[in-house]
Structures are given as structure tokens and as C-alpha cells.
Image (cartoon, rainbow, N blue to C red):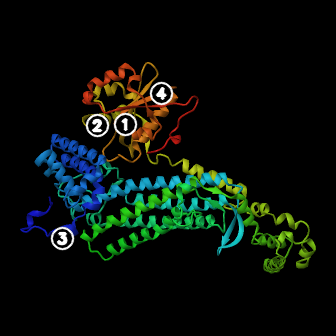
Amino acid sequence: MALWGGRFTQAADTRFKQFNDSLRFDYRLAEQDIVGSIAWSKSLRSVGVLTAAEQKQLELALNELKLSVMEDPEQILKSDAEDIHSWVEQQLIDRVGDLGKKLHTGRSRNDQVATDLKLWCRQQGQQLLLALDKLQDQLVTVASENQTTVLPGYTHLQRAQPVTFAHWCLAYVEMFERDYSRLSDAMNRFDTCPLGSGALAGTAYPIDREALAHSLGFQRATRNSLDSVSDRDHVMELMSVASVSMLHLSRMAEDLIFYNSGESNFIELADTVTSGSSLMPQKKNPDALELIRGKTGRVYGAMASMMMTVKALPLAYNKDMQEDKEGLFDALDTWFDCLEMATLCFEGITINAQRTLEAAMQGYSNATELADYLVAKGIPFREAHHIVGVAVVTAIGKSCALEELSLDEMKAFSEVIEDDVYPILTIESCLEKRCALGGVASDQVSYAISEAEKRLESRYSPQIKVRNARLTDIDAIESMVAYWAELGENLPRERNELVRNIGLFAVSEHQGEVTGCGSLYVYDSGLAEVRSLGIETGWQNQGQGSAMVEYLLKKADRMAIKRVFVLTRVPEFFTRLGFVSTSKSLLPEKVMKDCEVCPRLHACDEVALEFVFEQDKLITAESLAVG
């Protein structure tokens, strides 16, 4: 079904339809389109276009559709719909009839797709931030394990000065930290909601666009309708961040490929990230790293393509903008895959510390130390530089290291050289003298590792605040509990029951707005249950649920509860947080009695999971995975 057919007397040519349609790639925006549609239905209710009953019916139908899409996203591709917007609208009409046709009142596909894309970018951005964190965390772990592993440092691919493998790892931690900062900044800039901008001139209905923006989790509404529907800065900025980060990944991959070579033999990659040769049985190829290096150009190409697409486009929306998605999807997918693969490469890496030490001791990497020694004896640096150059030539001629020259030979270069020169020329001295901030001295490397660990630890559950519920939260809690109960995800709870048990509840909030709720119900046996877990529409897949469960687990641990269970239809969510399967038969009779009010009583598809606290171990949010 096309959304624009009334103006036309002839059907579109099938070749044009194939050329024009975008469903084959924008189907990935299905969840975002549905979430945006739910928020729009509430806005239409607020201005009297929809009644409360109509809005509720639309919201339930849209959420049923969302659950269906989450279970089988590929179903969308079986349709001949023009795009994801027309597919969602047709599915909605199939479910609720003509009422579904009212939803698009006051809305255009222009502001709709702009909103969908920003919602998708925000969700992907959070996943990429976590992937950057994981890679940095793995690098810090490897650095911590290799603080004393000496490594030759290079300039111009020539051995220059000794460093440590830890120092090398931390160099890339800094690069990826800048990527994290750039991505965070980009996400902050595009945290604005275009919905309600219409086709280009704004909507004709008195929608509260700030409230609409907040309901979708945005900081604010966009300020100008023309800019709102034609802005793709966030697409190009994300591609730019991805390109710079891929550059860093490529440089790191090249270093590791070199270190892994037979000529260097500094490291060995695990079998899990290498492959063999179809002809030469002795080969073990660093294919993962080579692919990271190779895929970098793919991301660069996507960014260049998008910038050329937008260049010189007049305001406002033009069909050219349909080209924003394929490149963006591919670039961010590629970046994410490469971040994950780089992390995997470090999980099984082996460092040949003896070989790296031998290499660091070759190439006269202590020549600068001899020059500094001469400067300390009062010789101007330029003269000292020349003296050491002559000494290196002599050592090369004798095929020995500088420190292997005798004192008499040393004195031939300069009379100020004494026996105290030899301790200066050791690898240990070379490293420890670099003691300024950011240097390779052991205390500086330890400090850098400690600071990186603190920085990474502080990032868990970013911007998600969970607190004990208050009576002033009761309306929001009642709304969420009723909403998920109608979908069959939770058991229904009466308002008076919620008021009576408000002390059991916790809520998550963003900028003062309640975005999720959950409760911890304690049984006589000391067993506790996570109940009434629900997230406000538009806030799913952003860590709200994980943060809520972690908060409730921490609360249970403080109460000395040993086991917390949950009955759920999404066990994979809870297993990521440390829950394990259990049997319903082991649960108290009161639990099963509660099930008598469940609409799924005779067709129950919930499974039981439990979290068992380790004795004398405090569970904290930081020790649990954030989903």
C-alpha cells in the first residue's frame, strides 16, 4: 500500500517501484517507527484528535506489532510495502481497522523518518560506547599484566627507544578514549526530536513538542521545522567518528601484524582469531587484524558518499536523503564488528617477553641516554649528539652494543665519561628516567593504568538513575504496570496494592521523568522475587531494565537475602545479569497462587530463573554486566 496514491491515475512502473522503495534496508527502523508512532498517538490524544480509548487501542496494537517484529524482523521483507512507514501503517490498519488511518494525522514521513533515524542512532551509539569501553578495558587488562615487558619503540619503523608493552597498550587506550569522547559529543548534539515538524513547515495541531521529545527520551525538541526534516548532520558526524576510530583500529592492527610476523616474533595471536593456508600447513595468518585494516576503507567510503549526497541539496527534504541509511548502517555495523574483533584478539594474545627484550636491546636504543649523560657532564647537547653518533659507528664496526665498549674506548670519544656511564645505559635505566607524566617509567605506567581503570569503572549505567520509589511516582508506576499487564508481560496490580507496597518499588528516571519501575517482594522464607518490571515506551534497549534489576539485587544483598527469582518470558535478559534456570516446583506456594490471576494461566510460557548470592560477597552494580 502506497501512502500517496490519490493524486495519481496510473500505477507506478514496477522498475520505478524497485528503484524507489526502501523497505529492503529501512526495515531496520521498524522498532523505532513503532515507538515514535506510540508517542505520536499520545500527542494526538492530548489535542483531541484521538480519544483516550482510541489511543489505548492503537498503543496496544502497536506494541503487539513491536513484539512481533522483535521476534521475527525478517517478516517485514516479505511485504511489497514502499518503506517501513507504510508497512507499519498497513499492519496497524489490519489490526484495528480504520482507526489505524487516523494515526498519521498532522505527521509527515519527513519528520517521521528523521525521528526514526535519530532513535536508531541513539540506540546504536550506546552499543558502540559499550564496545569502546570493552576494548579499552581489555587493553588495560593486558597492560596491567605486562607492565615489566620491555618492547622496542619505533620511529620510521626503526628501533628508537625502549618502552613497555603496557605503555604501547595505553597509547591505544588514549586513542579509543578520544573516540569515546567524540561519539558522546555527537550523541549529545543529535539528542533533539524532529517529530512534529511535519513535511517542512511544522504540524497544524497544537502539539506540545517539548513533552513529545521528552516522552521519546530526547533532551529537547528541534527548533526549526525546515532544518529538522533536512538535517543529516548526525549521520555524517557518526560516520566521521567511525572513520577516525577505524583509523585507530587500523593502526593498531598494523602494529600487531608486524609484531606477529616471523621477523619480529613479539606476539602470538590465539587460534580463535587466525586462519591457516590451503597450501602451506605451517602458516598461521592474522586474518582478523588484516580484515580490520581492510574494512577501514569501507567506512571511509560511506562517509565520503554521504557528504557528496548532501552537498548542495536545497531545503527541505529531497529523495536523495534516502541514501543516508545504507551507508550509515554498514559503517556502524562494520565499526562495531571491528571493535568486537579487536577485543577478541587481545583476549588470547601471548607476549614473547624474552624476544621483545632482546629486540629492545638491539639497535642502539640507549644512544639518547649516553647523550643525556654527556649533557649532565656539561657538554652541550649538539656536541654530545655528535659524540654519541661517532660512538655508535664504532660499536657497529665492532658488532657490539654501546655498553659493551670498554671504558678506554668510551674515553676516546670524551674524557668526561667514567665508570658511572654503564648503569645509565641499561634498559631499566632507560625506562625509569622517563618519569614525567605520560612517560614510560614504571610508576607513570602504573598511574596511567589506575586512572584508566577508574575512568572505565565510572561509566557503567551512564545517565541512568535508579532510586527508591515515592508516593508521587504512583501514577507513573500504575501506568507502566497496567500497560505491561495488558500485554501479558506482568501480572495486573490494583492501585491500592501499589500504594500499600510503594516501599518495595524502585524507579529509574531521566531528567526527572520516571522511565521504568520494578519491585522486590520478600517471602517469609527469605526468598525474594523481582516483580512488576516495566520500562516506559521509548526507553527500551537503553540499559534501563538492567540498571533496575541491578539496583534491586543490591537492595536484596543488603537485606541478607540469599536468593532472588523471577518468572519471565525473556530469560536471555536475566541470564546476562547472572540469573540461572531453576524449577517452578521449588518456588513457594504463594508464588503459584499469584499466578491464578494471570491471563496466561492455562498457557503459561514463563520460565523460572534465580540469582544466588555468593556468601559474604556484596553484589554491586559495577560487578554486573550492563545490558
Image coordinates for residue 187, horizontal then vertical, percent: 41, 58
How far is disc 2 from disc 3 in space, using C-alphas?
44 Å
How far is disc 4 from disc 1 in space, using C-alphas?
21 Å
Number of numbered discs overlaid on the protein picture: 4
Q: Which mark is residue 21?
A: none
Label 3 element class: helix
> Tags 3 and 1 in contact by the CB under 8 Å rule?
no
Answer above or below: position of 54 versus 197: above
Judged left or right of residue 443, residue 553 is: left
Would you name the residue on which mark 3 appears?
A: 15
Kind of residue sitting beneath label 2: Trp
Judged left or right of residue 254, residue 43 is: left
Kind of residue sitting beneath label 1: Cys
How far is disc 3 from disc 1 in space, using C-alphas?
50 Å
Which of the pair 306/391 is nearer the observer? 391
Image coordinates for residue 364, horizontal then vertical, percent: 77, 72
Q: Residues within 10 Å of mark 1 (few under 14, many from 20)?
A: many
**Mark toward the start of the polypeptide (3 vs 1):** 3
How far is disc 4 from disc 3 in space, using C-alphas?
61 Å
Would you name the residue on which mark 1 appears?
A: 517
How far is disc 2 from disc 1 in space, using C-alphas?
11 Å
Residue situated furthest right in the rendering: 408
Would you name the residue on which mark 4 appears?
A: 563
Q: Give the label, 2 or 1, closer to the camera.
A: 2
Answer above or below: position of 177 versus 401: above
**Mark toward the start of the polypeptide (4 vs 3):** 3
Q: Give the label, 4 or 1, closer to the camera.
A: 4
Kind of residue sitting beneath label 3: Arg
Q: Give the label, 2 or 4, closer to the camera.
A: 4
Image coordinates for residue 291, horizontal then vertical, percent: 49, 65
Which of the pair 164/507 is nearer the observer? 164
